[in-house]
Amino acid sequence: MRNRLIAAIVFATAGTALVTVPTAAEAKRVLVCKSVKKSANKGTVIGAVSGGVLGNVVAGHGAKTEGTLIGAGVGAVAGHQIAKSNAKKKRCHYEYR
């Protein structure tokens, strides 16, 4: 009688352990994004160069240096933000964990 009681308790606890194991359907869906640093850095460099060239062309006579520096600064910031937002859109996916 005592052995049957112990066996029943063991099977009952083992059965509940199997029921509480999470299944694939209960896994959480998580958004995973890869690093965007390389793309953002490329955008910064491209924006700085193109902004510097554009600033040099647009600047008036005698203010070429200032136009180049201001254009490079504005172009670097704009290029960085554009490249970062484009890279985030393309490198994210959902995974089940």
Image: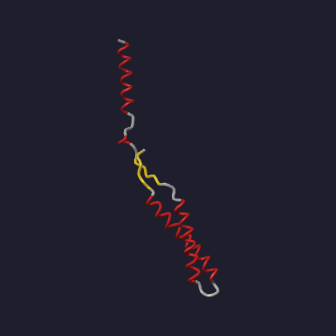
In this picture, residue 13 sits left or right of residue 84: left
Q: To which quarter of the image does residue 56 belong?
A: bottom right
Q: Position of residue 71 (x, y in %)?
A: 58, 76
Vertical order, 97 against 16 (above or below): below
Q: How is the image coloured?
A: secondary structure
Quadrant housing the N terminus: top left
Q: Position of residue 17 (x, y in %)?
A: 39, 30
In this picture, residue 48 sits left or right of residue 18: right
Vertical order, 48 against 15 (above or below): below
Vertical order, 77 against 65 (above or below): above
Q: Position of residue 65 (x, y in %)?
A: 64, 80
Image point 37% across, 30% down: which residue? 18
Image point 40% across, 48% down: which residue? 29
Image point 39% across, 37% down: which residue? 22
Quadrant housing the C terminus: top left
Image point 51% across, 66% down: which residue? 81
